Image (cartoon, rainbow, N blue to C red):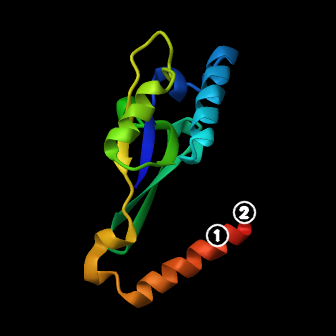
């Protein structure tokens, strides 16, 4: 099972305040634990929403809105993508993570990633083959 661990933004991350050396060291150690356990697939911090954009879809119309975005508690400051056996194991890994914003209250949201079998018969053999080709092409680019 794959899980996306979403680090919720705060006013400092949205202001572009970078982590200090201690937090970078602590996060590096935590990432090493994830790597050594063989569960880390990806993990990155994200630039503030002021450097981002949103695209709103309404039928065939697309509307682009540049950041920053006002609801800080709804924004994401970073993520990990892990592969573990259960949601409980994902929770245990998150509980071991350093506080992303030391000295304040932080939140990491845990969301399971859809797998091919979750889509049932609508995900036809042809669609599965197409996805496998895409994943193979992505792997070659790395």
Residue in front for this viewpoint, 128 or 35: 35
From what the image shows, is residue 130 above or below residue 101?
below
Q: Secondary structure at mark 1?
A: helix
Quarter holding residue 24 = top right
Q: Position of residue 82 (x, y in %)?
A: 49, 47
Q: What residue did someone put label 2 on?
A: 142
From what the image shows, is residue 123 above or below residue 47?
below
Q: What residue did someone put label 1 on?
A: 138
Quarter holding residue 58 = bottom left
Q: How many numbered markers are drawn?
A: 2
From what the image shows, is residue 72 above or below residue 26?
below
Q: Residue at x 58, y 72 (%)?
A: 135
Q: Residue at x 61, y 19 (%)?
A: 23
For the residues labelled 2 and 1, say whether their Cβ atoms are less than 8 Å apart: yes
> Is 120 left or right of 101, judged from the image as shown?
left
> Is 107 left or right of 80, judged from the image as shown?
left
Q: Position of residue 46 (x, y in %)?
A: 57, 39
Q: Residue at x 27, y 77 (%)?
A: 120
Residue in front for this viewpoint, 140 or 48: 140
- Cα gap from disc 2 to disc 1, whole angstroms: 7 Å
């Amino acid at each position: 099972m794959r899980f996306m661990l979403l680090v919720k933004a705060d006013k400092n991350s949205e202001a572009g305040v970078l982590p200090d050396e201690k937090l970078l060291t602590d996060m590096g150690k935590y990432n090493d634990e994830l790597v050594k356990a063989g569960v880390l697939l990806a993990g990155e911090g994200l630039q503030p929403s002021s450097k981002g954009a949103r695209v709103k879809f309404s039928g065939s119309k697309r509307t682009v809105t540049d950041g920053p975005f006002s609801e800080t508690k709804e924004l994401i400051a970073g993520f990990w993508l892990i592969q573990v056996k259960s949601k409980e194991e994902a929770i245990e890994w998150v509980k071991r993570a350093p506080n992303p914003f030391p000295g304040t209250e932080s939140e990491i949201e845990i969301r399971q990633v859809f797998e091919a079998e979750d889509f049932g018969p609508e995900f036809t053999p042809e669609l599965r083959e197409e996805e496998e080709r895409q994943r193979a092409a992505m792997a070659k680019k790395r």
